[in-house]
Image (cartoon, rainbow, N blue to C red):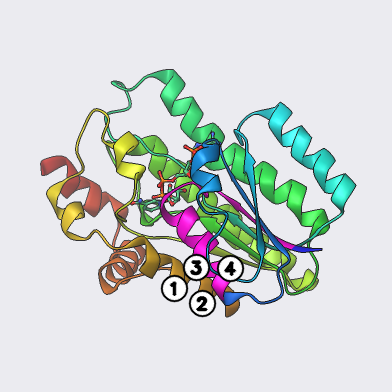
């Protein structure tokens, strides 16, 4: 059975991936969609497309839930043609103001669970399969008042690029998606204590556009997917200018 697995599928870019992958890929038998909110997952069950949608309600940071999924893999022995690691969260605010629990949960979800999912899916992936990992443009530069989040996304970006190189001999391509601000529920949690700066609101884009580019870049086996001219310019300048310069002005802002 050919399947795709999509984490963080109950909203935002994960849900958009479910819709677009189901329309774009003809050879998938099932798409397994994962998140904690079952009602949201079930509302995607009848979307237009080729594959059957299998909603799986689980907390992907919970080891017992992950073990149950591993057992299910053993039983079904699927061919995982595509893994999309979209689940992720961020909190805006000074590190010394935010709770330890929130910061550690962010690391668990953005880094630990993404690494675990990649590890448990790989044995079921063959030549020409794809992994799409949601990093962020926040990975390009250390971000004061988004410190842990941007560090987790640097992890995702570096991990994905290294893995893409390692897996070339198996014909599996890994694409790190690095959007700037995207209009999703992400900000309901991110802005719990502090709002995002106005210039980020101006750069806000639609999830459908980011996902469409991500899927195209994944098809082309590109290691990084960056949507919008503004974010490509941001990436360019963070590569050619010293980060200390950005951080100086950030502090002065
Ligand atoms: N929005 C942006 O501006 C932006 C920019 C750059 C990168 N990103 C990244 O893009 C990815 C998608 O973000 P988004 O904007 O689509 O956010 P979103 O709408 O808030 O979606 C996050 C998803 O993660 C799931 N999730 C959270 N905790 C989970 C857990 N413990 N177990 C299972 N699922 C969990 C949520 O589902 P449940 O709550 O139902 O579990 C939800 O489906 C994230 O990795 C984010 O960091 C976002």
Which of these two is toward me, 135 or 144?
135
Which residue is under mark 2?
A: 216
Which residue is under mark 3?
A: 224
Q: CA distance from mark 2 to mark 4?
A: 14 Å
Which residue is under mark 4?
A: 22
- Judged by depth in the image, the label closer to the viewer, 2 or 4, is 4
Q: Quadrant of residue 137?
A: bottom left
Which of these two is toward me, 204 or 165?
204
Q: Where 210 sits versus 73, above or below? A: below
Which of these two is toward me, 31 or 240?
31
Q: Are marks 3 and 4 in contact (CB under 8 Å)?
A: no
Whether residue 69 can be seen here: yes
Residue 241 painted magenta: no
Residue at (68% x, 42% y) in the render: 116
Q: CA distance from mark 3 to mark 4?
A: 22 Å
In the rendered image, residue 167, in percent from the top left (x then y), is placed at 73, 65
Which residue is under mark 1?
A: 213
> Element under label 1?
helix
Local packing at callout 2 (Cα closer than 10 Å; few below 14, some 14-19, many 20+) is: few
Indicate if the residue with disc 4 has its beta carbon within 8 Å of ligand 1.
no
Indicate if the residue with disc 2 has its beta carbon within 8 Å of ligand 1.
no
The answer to which of marks 3 and 2 sits earlier in the sequence is 2
In the rendered image, residue 205, in percent from the top left (x then y), is placed at 28, 62
Q: CA distance from mark 1 to mark 4?
A: 15 Å
Local packing at callout 1 (Cα closer than 10 Å; few below 14, some 14-19, many 20+) is: some
Q: Are marks 1 and 2 in contact (CB under 8 Å)?
A: yes
Residue at (47% x, 49% y) in the render: 154
| Chain part drawn in magenta | 3-23
């Amino acid at each position: 059975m050919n399947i795709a697995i999509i984490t963080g599928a109950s909203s935002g870019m994960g849900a958009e991936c479910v819709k677009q992958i189901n329309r774009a890929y003809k050879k998938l038998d099932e798409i397994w969609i994962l998140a904690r909110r079952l009602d949201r997952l079930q509302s995607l069950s009848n979307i237009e497309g080729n594959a059957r949608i299998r909603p799986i309600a689980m907390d992907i940071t919970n080891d017992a839930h992950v073990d149950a999924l591993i057992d299910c893999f053993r039983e079904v022995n699927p061919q995982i043609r595509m893994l999309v690691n979209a689940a992720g969260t961020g909190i805006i605010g000074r590190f010394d103001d935010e709770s330890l629990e929130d910061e550690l949960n962010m690391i668990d979800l953005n880094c630990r669970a993404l690494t675990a999912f990649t590890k448990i899916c790989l044995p079921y992936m063959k030549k020409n399969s794809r992994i799409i990992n949601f990093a962020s443009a926040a990975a390009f530069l250390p971000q004061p008042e988004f410190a842990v989040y941007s560090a987790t996304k640097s992890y995702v970006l570096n991990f994905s690029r290294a893995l893409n190189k390692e897996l070339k001999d198996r014909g599996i391509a890994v694409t790190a998606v690095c959007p700037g601000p995207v209009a999703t529920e992400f900000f309901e949690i991110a802005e719990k204590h502090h709002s995002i700066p106005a210039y980020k609101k101006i750069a806000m884009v639609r999830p459908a556009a980011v996902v469409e580019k991500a899927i195209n870049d994944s098809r082309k086996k590109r290691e990084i997917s960056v949507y919008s001219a503004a974010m490509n310019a941001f990436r360019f300048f963070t590569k050619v200018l010293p980060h200390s310069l950005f951080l100086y002005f950030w502090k002065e802002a």
